[in-house]
Amino acid sequence: MGVEPRELRCNACGAALHYEEGAAVIKCAHCGTEYALETPPGGVLEFTLEEAEEEAEEEAEPAEPERPPYEEEASSWLREGKKVQAIQVVRVHTGLGLGESKEYVEALAVREGIVLPARSAAYAAVVVAVLIAVAVSGLVLYLLALR
Ligand SMILES: [Zn+2]
């Protein structure tokens, strides 16, 4: 009396697998999928799908994240001090919103060690422009009132 053959089925195609005593692998006669075997003494025959194991390994060790091309483009804008263009590049290529793209670009600048031009300079320029506009229109109104 031998051990009753355990019925195994191929995970990939469902065909019956024929196990040869002492074999290290079972190969599915139907689709060719190979299964590595582990036969603990007196235990249940276990089989694992080699393919699945490989996939799991790939997922386990993520590949070095590749730098997306738009990031290079955004980075070169940043190096020229053109933050707005860099944000625009990120927006177009990622579909992120303005705020998220801005954060992305600022994080990118930090990663790349790029010092962005101080925002206060731009604000100061706007404030000066507004003051001049107010002064000019005030002068115009004053001159009109004199007539
Ligand atoms: Zn199969």
Image (cartoon, grey):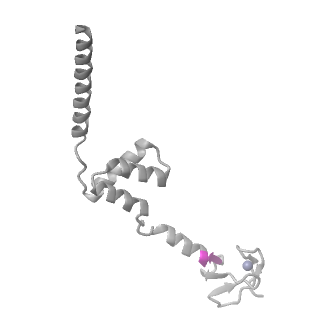
**Vertical position of residue 100 compared to residue 11: above or below:** above
Considering depth in this image, is 124 or 62 the residue closer to the camera?
A: 124
Q: Can you give x and y, in whole percent of width and height, for residue 145 in the image?
A: 25, 8
Question: 55 left or right of 45?
Answer: left
Quarter that holds the N terminus: bottom right
Which residue extends farthest front?
147
Considering depth in this image, is 73 or 104 the residue closer to the camera?
A: 73
Residue for point 24% across, 17% down? 138
* Residue 57 appears in the rendering: yes
**Magenta stretch containing residue 21, yes or no?**
no
Q: Can you give x and y, in whole percent of width and height, for residue 51 in the image?
A: 60, 76
Question: 88 left or right of 42?
Answer: left
Question: 71 left or right of 92?
Answer: left
Quarter that holds the C terminus: top left
Q: What main secondary structure does the magenta stretch of the protein show?
A: strand
Question: 16 left or right of 40?
Answer: right
Tell me which segment is drawn in magenta. Answer: 46-51
Q: Quadrant of residue 80?
A: bottom left
Q: Quadrant of residue 46?
A: bottom right
**Vertical position of residue 130 compared to residue 101: above or below:** above
**Vertical position of residue 127 compared to residue 73: above or below:** above
Residue for point 69% across, 85% down? 27
Q: Can you give x and y, in whole percent of width and height, for residue 104 in the image?
A: 38, 50
* Residue 68 appears in the rendering: no
- Give the quadrant of ligand 1: bottom right
